């Protein structure tokens, strides 16, 4: 099936609502290709439906925080004399932090000055479905020259971020932190350091994320990426509105990664050989610095905004106390290092020593690292290649964290179990769920009020960070697991999570490796009417 035919089918199944820009895909229940036992004729809650409006009304409407944002081509300074042409929110990397208080209403207007359609997804927020920012599912793409007014209640405090859900745009400079403060903050600390991690390819020697995707989609062997479609096996519907550039021969060097391995990730570390790894938009040769006083208690909010890289993080000379993961509090746990898959966030507390200390961010398995500095006193800055011993010390993984009692999922027998196999290979680059590339009309049905269990089995030889929109789940399929919205599943391993179906709509479930997602490793959790 061609991409053009797929797009027509998806658009034809929906209606454009006047004045809202929302695409109500397949809300009449006439589509086929449903997943997990859904029958033709099932009716799903539409993103603009009365059920979504009712859920939003229950969240209330607090003080309105107004923000204007522009997505635009920009020249970005990565430090050390290196500037690149990319796309960004304004002229900075990461984009300017948006900070609100839980209970506020965020009213953010995004103006699209890019040459392609775009969108904006609020990663980790349990928000109203028609503001979730998935083109072809919850809204129409924002056309070049147009704008879109996002407005929603912000229910939960925590560390979040936002980025497009259009093609591989996230692997440019289009990302920024979203910090939701707790009006009853239980933690005591002197200062806060927001740390955004990234892998960078755009604008370096002619490379673009679209060219990287085009190269990867050919697979490892001659012709192995062809799955019978005219787009290298990718069958996305309107979600793939990136108008992927045709990659001319010689359009930048090869970025396919070979031989990157990590025991922590179960083998293969990633697909893409990035020329740079960044902390807060800076290369390790010209790192950003955070200034504090000796003895200060600092809250670090760590966000992995990368496209294809897990990062192992340690602060030289310090131990970290983990307080939150993916915005939700956990029982405080001390560690030397943390491993973050793409899309994951961790909050930690440190008590600052006296001197200049490296925050080293290892690109796990890729033999490279990024760097930022904590300065509390005099002293020479560590070199870009510094590797503090803490990187090889105690490492706490999410499965070992215990949720704070205030957010632990109540014990309950699941009402529904959805089993999903992760499939595909690097050879054919045919990443998918259950060997079915993404289609917007293919849904796993749930009903409001259910406890839903997701049982994943990773049949591939690659690790995948799985992200569920609009909800948080409990790890290990029970109340004892930490609450998260993004979780790493290792090769040939299972992963079980539970969530409560308490936010009606059509919600994406996908791998947060942006290239795997665009190859087809995405599906939809749909609430039945």
Image (cartoon, helix red, strand yellow):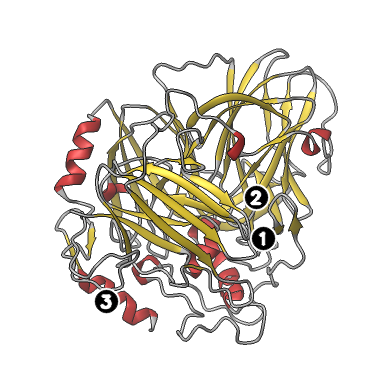
The disc at residue 293 is none
Query: Which residue lies at the image location 76% right of the left edge and 18% below the top edge?
Result: 353
Query: Which quarter of the picture shows residue 64?
Result: top left
Which comes sooner in the sequence, label 1 or label 3? 3
- Marker disc for residue 270: 1
What quarter of the picture does the N terminus occupy? bottom left
Q: Are marks 1 and 2 in contact (CB under 8 Å)?
A: yes
Tell which of 276 and 228 is nearer to you: 228
Residue designated by label 3 = 9
The span from disc 1 to disc 2 (Cα, nearest Å) is 8 Å
Which residue is labeled 2 in the image?
310
Q: Is residue 52 left or right of residue 89?
A: left
- Give the side of residue 445 with respect to residue 116, left or right: left
Give the SS element for disc 3.
helix
Rendered view: 396 above or below 18: above
Who comes first in sequence, dot 1 or dot 2? 1
Contact between labelled residues 3 and 1, with CB atoms less than 8 Å apart: no
């Amino acid at each position: 099936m061609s991409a053009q035919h797929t797009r027509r089918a998806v658009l034809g199944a929906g209606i454009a609502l006047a004045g809202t820009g929302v695409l109500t895909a397949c809300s009449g229940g006439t589509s086929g290709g449903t997943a997990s036992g859904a029958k033709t004729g099932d009716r799903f809650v539409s993103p603009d439906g009365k059920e979504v409006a009712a859920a939003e009304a229950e969240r209330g409407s607090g003080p309105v925080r107004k923000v204007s944002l522009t997505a635009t081509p920009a020249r970005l300074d990565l430090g050390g004399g290196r500037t690149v042409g990319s796309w960004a929110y304004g002229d900075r990397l990461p984009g300017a932090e948006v900070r609100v208080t839980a209970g506020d209403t965020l009213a953010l207007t995004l103006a699209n000055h890019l040459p392609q359609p775009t969108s904006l997804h609020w990663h980790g927020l349990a928000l109203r479905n028609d503001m979730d920012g998935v083109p072809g599912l919850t809204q129409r793409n924002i056309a070049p020259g147009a704008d879109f007014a996002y407005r929603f209640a912000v229910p939960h405090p925590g560390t979040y971020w936002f980025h497009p859900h259009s093609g591989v745009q996230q692997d440019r400079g289009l990302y920024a932190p979203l910090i939701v403060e707790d009006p009853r903050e239980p933690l005591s600390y002197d200062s806060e350091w927001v740390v955004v991690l990234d892998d960078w390819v755009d604008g370096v020697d002619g490379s673009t994320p679209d060219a990287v995707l085009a190269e990867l989609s050919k697979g490892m062997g001659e012709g192995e990426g062809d799955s019978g479609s005219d787009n290298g096996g990718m069958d996305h519907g309107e979600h793939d509105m990136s108008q992927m550039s045709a990659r001319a021969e010689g359009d930048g060097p090869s970025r396919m990664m070979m031989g990157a391995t990590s025991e922590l990730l179960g083998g293969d570390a990633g697909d893409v050989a990035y020329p740079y790894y960044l902390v807060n938009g800076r290369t390790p040769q010209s790192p950003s610095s955070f200034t504090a006083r000796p003895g200060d208690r600092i809250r670090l909010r760590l966000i992995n905004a990368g496209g294809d890289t897990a990062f192992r993080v340690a602060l030289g000379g310090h131990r970290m106390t983990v307080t939150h993961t993916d915005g939700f509090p956990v029982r405080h746990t001390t560690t030397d290092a943390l491993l973050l898959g793409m899309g994951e966030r961790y909050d930690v507390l440190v008590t600052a020593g006296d001197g200049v200390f490296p925050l080293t961010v290892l690109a796990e398995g890729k033999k490279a690292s990024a760097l930022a500095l904590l300065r509390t006193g005099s002293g020479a800055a560590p070199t870009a290649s510094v590797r503090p011993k803490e990187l090889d010390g105690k490492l706490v993984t999410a499965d070992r964290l215990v949720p704070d009692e205030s957010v632990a999922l109540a014990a309950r027998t699941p009402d529904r179990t959805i089993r999903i196999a992760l499939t595909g290979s690097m050879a054919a680059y045919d990443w998918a769920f259950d060997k079915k590339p993404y289609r917007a009309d293919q849904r796993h049905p749930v009903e409001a009020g259910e406890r839903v269990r997701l049982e994943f089995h990773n049949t591939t030889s690659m690790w995948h960070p799985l992200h569920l929109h609009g909800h948080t789940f409990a790890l290990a399929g029970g109340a004892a697991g930490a609450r998260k919205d993004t979780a790493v599943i290792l090769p040939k391993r299972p992963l079980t999570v539970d969530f409560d179906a308490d936010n009606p709509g059509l919600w994406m479930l996908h791998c947060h490796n942006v290239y795997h997602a665009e190859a087809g490793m995405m599906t939809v959790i749909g609430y039945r009417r």
